[in-house]
Image (tube, grey):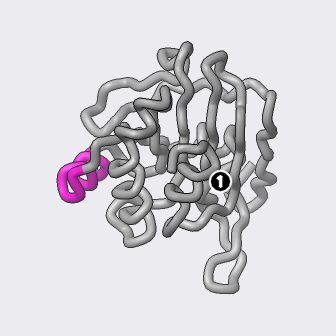
Amino acid sequence: MTETDVAPVRLTPGEVAPDFTLPDADGTPVSLASYRGRRVIVYCYPAALTPGCTTQAVDFTAAAGDLAEAGLDIIGISPDAPDKLLRFREKEELGITLVSDPEKEVLKAYGAFGPKKLYGKEVVGVIRSTFIIDAEGRIEKAAYNVKATGHVSKLLRDLGLS
């Protein structure tokens, strides 16, 4: 299957979240399975060091303390290489876990890679998406095509944290 004929899956509440182990900005493997017993926000974004993705990562960093108090950890997934994620983390002083999925296998498993509209044109790429995974590793909430700006504050409201 080529990237042009990707038919994205759509995860729904109650489904088991696709497990993954991906390298973080330091090259350390991060496994979803190691978060069992805690809720996790997994968010998928197109590219580090771009305006929308920076806004979203900075917002997640700002909310990380409140989310952690509520028992939620944060993992951001993009196709960027670990060294780019490291530059992103350092430049923006990000306090969240960012992992690299250059083969886009995990992004595809989450339905976060496929056809999307970009400036009125259909392109194939990362679909900005957010998933809340419960302590047992099941999808609690799946949101596709989310906006970079304002998404984290909406998520906090939806979780009753703001």
Is 44 in front, or is 154? Answer: 154
The image shows residue 29 at horizontal and vertical percentages of 38, 24
Is 81 in front, or is 3? Answer: 81
The image shows residue 153 at horizontal and vertical percentages of 51, 58
Count of residue discs: 1
Q: Which residue ends up furthest to the bottom in the rendered image?
A: 120
> Does 90 appear in magenta?
yes
Task: Indicate whether 80 appears above or below 66.
Answer: below
Residue with the mark numbered 1: 113
> Does 80 appear in magenta?
no
At horizontal 32% and vertical 64% (from top left) the residue drawn is 49
Task: Indicate whether 152 appears above or below 107.
Answer: below
Task: Give the quadrant of residue 106.
Answer: top right
At horizontal 71% and vertical 40% (from top left) the residue drawn is 141
Q: Is residue 25 left or right of residue 53?
A: left
The image shows residue 152 at horizontal and vertical percentages of 50, 55
Q: Is residue 98 left or right of residue 160?
A: left
Task: Indicate whether 73 appears above or below 76.
Answer: above
Which residues, given as a range, are shown in magenta? 83-93
